[in-house]
Image: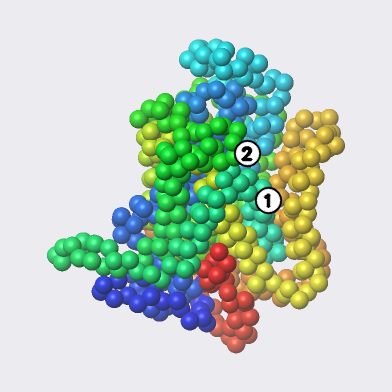
Amino acid sequence: MTSAITSCEPSQALQREDNVLNCHTEGPNRKKGGQSRSPSSNNLVYSILEVPPWYLCILMGIQHFLTALGGLVSVPLILAKDLCLQHDPLTQSYLISTIFFVSGFCTLLQVFFGVRLPILQGGTFAFVAPSLAMLSLPTWKCPPWTLNASLVNTSSPEFTEEWQKRIRELQGAIMVASCVQMLVGFSGLIGFLMRYIGPLTIAPTISLVALPLFDSAGNNAGIHWGIAAMTIFLIVLFSQYLKNVAVPMPIYRGQKKCRVSKFYLFQVFPVLLALCISWLLCFVLTVTNTLPTAPTAYGHLARTDTKGDVLSRAPWFRFPYPGQWGLPTISLAGVFGIIAGVISSMVESVGDYYACARLVGAPPPPRHAVNRGIGIEGLGCLLAGAWGTGNGTTSYSENVGALGITRVGSRTVMVAAGCVLLLMGVFGKIGAAFATIPTPVIGGMFLVMFGVITAVGISNLQYVDMNSSRNLFIFGFSIYCGLAIPNWVNQNSEKLQTGILQLDQVIQVLLTTGMFVGGFLGFFLDNTIPGSLEERGLLVWNQIQEESEETARALEVYCLPCGIGSTSCTSSCAQRLPFWPTGEAGRGVRTAALTPARVSSWLVRPAGFRFAVSTIV
């Protein structure tokens, strides 16, 4: 977990020989590019500070883009009907390109200036519910003629004004709500709360990011279970059974010119390979008309030509810009609803930071990094509102799961993913082409990814005494309520009407977000029910947090670029800022003593998580 902890498991090292292009470490102190690899990252192909070859960065960046593609495309398509765009696929493709572009820009901001972990930023489903609630108000309901394809003239000024005034209202609400998120992050309030957030809060929060999505993932996969099952089979085959199989590939190495070297292709690109093979199969089945052509027939949406309008009508080049739909407008009802989404998004993101750090072999994020991460996410939501995506941005849990499967935690790869998203937002045809990936392929991928995320959440309980009835009650009750309460509220929303529209929206959004319900109950119960620090897991948890603040490894990972805050801009005034890194890596660092008691507390952790993703998925 940290650089002070030595792994007690035998490393699954792959020998690094002259004829092997890519491999694991041989030991905890192997260096690459002058950076020392953390012992806890021995199972990684590339750790957070390592830089893969440029061509691998591009391919793995595309893989992250494909992993996030389902969520990125889904958000604007879900909003399309309530924005009166049901029969305007061209404008839908513009929204898709815009969300690609903004997500890429926000990803780069987060990697360089935010929490500095390889976390992709994209549209958030936490904003979808309040957005739909606002658009369902009588003022914003679509006129009947916009729902009739024969009456819609997508180029008419009247139709353009109908959908643009709705998205401008969304823009204003998102921009105002994003200021609240920036305030919470940059003021250090979220970092202050982290003193009271332990494993029994983080575990249900992360697990409930994925568990409630079983219905969505199952429905997508259920479009054609054969295609989905093949996608799952290929991901598992490549990431688990063939991960140690080296494939001979031609490479170029300076004066030696072209030569054949072994490369662990299946281990690095399991998701990308599985998606491409399944996509190709769907294309073949579409061309041969093996898949049904009738829109109502089972398996029709597995065809690659069901989204052909997006591809044919999208322009080759289109550069999104702020205010492209006009000047944003603001209403109180929209702002209150989106603020509820912001709260849920922040809870999820904090959990994602810890999950990501564990998967990429980094120390837990210190408070200043968490503060910056939440603040930059608020800035990302502000930019998303200004550009007019109709949504905000948040950390993508799907890509955290992809890190676990591929075991590639390099920060440079996420920079490449951000650049890929920027390009997809500018080249409209390419973005539209990726949007034609069949639904069951995406559904199969999500079943694997969400399973990994759930397991990562539960693995936080390794710090807690699970023989304690107190802890069993808190975790079990939090998880169960996080599933049961949102389900009841979705089915009985009329029973929670208070007569105040804004309050109704806030209540409904919060109570239908499982990760908020479970995380809040875990937080409240863990801090009110009596229990010792050791029993609650806070003893080891706080030791790790303290070391994260102090060790050279943490300073190296979470410091701002160009030595800002460590070698430059180190004034006492700057270091008082809640989001500013303190100290200099390698100087004045207090090393935690490895006393027998502390070694024992680390060794009692369940041994499996260091390779948990390898064995669970």
Query: In the drawing, does residue 563 fall left or right of residue 601?
Result: left
Q: Which amino acid does label 1 sit on?
A: Pro
Mark 2, other Cα within 10 Å: few <14 / some 14–19 / many ≥20: many
**Residue at 62% over, 76% down:** 606
Residue 326: percent from left, percent from top? 51, 22
The one of 149 and 522 positioned closer to us in this rendering: 149
- 551, above or below 285, in the image: below
Q: Residue furthest left?
A: 255
Q: Is residue 415 visible?
A: no
Residue labelled with disc 2: 127
**Residue at 59% over, 43% down:** 223
Q: What residue type is labelled 2?
A: Phe
Q: Is residue 166 visible?
A: yes
Query: Dot 2 lies on which element?
Result: helix
Task: Specify the color scheme.
Answer: rainbow
Sequence-earlier tag: 2 or 1: 2
The one of 323 and 143 positioned closer to us in this rendering: 143
Question: Residue 31: which quarter of the image?
Answer: bottom left
- 504, above or below 577, in the image: above
